[in-house]
Every structure is written in structure tokens, then in C-alpha cells.
Amino acid sequence: MAAYRAPRIVEIVDTLPKSATGKILWRALQEQEA
């Protein structure tokens, strides 16, 4: 696997933020990281 494809940080969380339709809110995850 190329180095740029490997995750830099792996963080374990209990729950993922989801929208009303059940999709994961990736923006919210990115904001938590920053």
C-alpha cells in the first residue's frame, strides 16, 4: 500500500455522528480531529 493511502491517525470512538437518514457525518469527524 502506498504511504499516502495509509491513515496517519487511528482514533477509536464509541459512536459516530450520524445524520437523520443514518449516514455518517464525515465533516463532523474531521472537525473533531482539528
Image (spheres, rainbow, N blue to C red):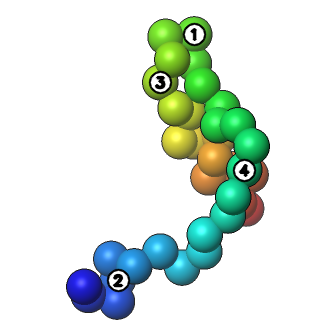
Asked whether, in this view, residue 33 is left or right of residue 10, the answer is right
Label 4 to label 2: alpha-carbon separation: 23 Å
Task: For label 2, count other residues whose C-alpha is less than 10 Å away and answer few (under 14), some (14-19) or many (20+).
Answer: few
The one nearer the camera, 25 or 11, is 11
**Circle nearer the viewer, 1 or 4:** 4
Q: Could you tell me which residue is drawn at 60 percent across and 25 percent down?
A: 18
| Residue at mark 1 | 20
Tell me what residue is drawn at x 72 percent, y 50 percent.
13
Quadrant position of the N terminus in the picture: bottom left
Residue 14 shown left or right of residue 3 in the figure: right
Q: Give the residue type that dot 3 points to.
A: Lys
Classify 2 as above or below 20.
below
Q: Name the residue carrying label 3.
A: 23
User: Are the residues at dot 3 and dot 2 in contact (C-beta closer than 8 Å)?
Assistant: no
Tag 4 near tag 2, CB within 8 Å: no
Question: Which residue has dot 4 on it?
Answer: 13
The one of 16 and 29 positioned closer to us in this rendering: 16
**Type of amino acid under label 1:** Ala
Q: Which residue is mark 2?
A: 4
In the picture, the quarter occupied by the C terminus is bottom right
